Structures are given as C-alpha cells and as structure tokens.
C-alpha cells in the first residue's frame, strides 16, 4: 500500500507476518514502486528500470543503486504507525528526473 506520511511517500508491505515501511521512490530516478511496480516475496521492483530492493532493509539486490530509506514501523491497536523524519524529503530521497 502506498501512502503519504508527514510529506513522505511511504510504501507499506507485509511479508512473512512482518510490516515494512520504505520510501516509495527508487533511489535511481525517483520512480514510485506503486503504482506500476511489483512487490513479490518481500522484494520491491522499480517499474522504470527493474532495480530490486529488499523491503525489510532497503538493500538493492538487482542493480547497483543506493539502498532505500526505511522507516520504523509498528502495529498498535490494529493500526500501522510509521515514524518519518520531521523534515520533508530532500533531493537525496526525491531526485529529479531530467
């Protein structure tokens, strides 16, 4: 599920009972994983170039891109709570495609 939390584009995934929260932008060209990309077995695939990242820790496993920013996430009373920085995302998290 793609959501916005405090100005951050966040992708929430659940794999093997664990909820993970990553930035919903590829570190290469800022393409959103959803809609358009795929999430399979805990791996996010960028729709623009096919780079693959582990949802659990953001590490790139299919390409040579920088790891995704991950966020602390927990479930409380049936709700998912995501901790994002107070400041909005900067150009490192949201590169501009030219």
Image (cartoon, grey):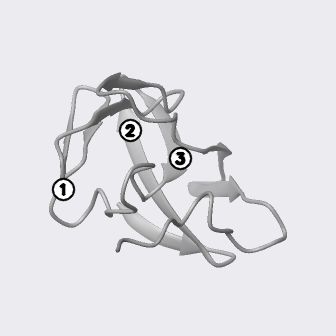
Cα separation, mark 1 vs mark 3, equals: 20 Å
Give coordinates of residue 90: x percent, y percent: 68, 68
- SS assignment at label 1: loop
Q: Earlier in the sequence, mark 1 or mark 3?
A: 3
Q: Is residue 6 left or right of residue 4?
A: right
Q: Are the two marked residues, 2 and 3, in contact with CB atoms closer than 8 angstroms?
A: no
Q: Which residue is identified by label 2?
A: 14
Q: Which residue is identified by label 3?
A: 21
Give coordinates of residue 91: x percent, y percent: 62, 67
Q: Is residue 49 left or right of residue 55?
A: left
Q: Is residue 74 left or right of residue 19?
A: right
Q: What is the crowding at mark 2: few (fewer than 14 residues within 10 Å), some, or many (at least 20)? A: some
- Identify which residue is drawn at 36% across, 32% down: 53
Give coordinates of residue 44: x percent, y percent: 29, 39
Q: Earlier in the sequence, mark 2 or mark 1?
A: 2
**Residue 19, placed above or below residue 26:** above
Give coordinates of residue 64: x percent, y percent: 37, 27
Q: Is residue 44 left or right of residue 25?
A: left
- SS assignment at label 3: strand
**Disc 2 vs disc 1: which is toward the camera?**
1
- Identify which residue is drawn at 36% across, 59% down: 29
The tag on residue 13 is none
Q: Which residue is identified by label 1?
A: 48
**Disc 2 vs disc 3: which is toward the camera?**
3
- Identify which residue is drawn at 35% across, 60% down: 1
Which of the pair 49/13 is nearer the observer?
Answer: 49
In which quadrant of the rendered view does residue 78 lie?
A: bottom right
């Amino acid at each position: 599920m793609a959501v916005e939390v405090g100005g951050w584009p966040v992708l929430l995934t659940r794999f093997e009972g664990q909820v993970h929260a990553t930035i919903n932008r590829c570190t290469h060209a800022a393409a959103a994983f959803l809609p358009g990309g795929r999430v399979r077995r805990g791996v996010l695939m960028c729709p623009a170039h096919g780079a693959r990242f582990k949802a659990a820790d953001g590490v790139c496993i299919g390409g040579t891109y920088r790891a995704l920013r991950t966020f602390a996430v927990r479930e409380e009373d049936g709700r998912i709570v995501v901790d994002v920085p107070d400041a909005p995302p900067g150009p490192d998290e949201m590169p501009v495609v030219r």
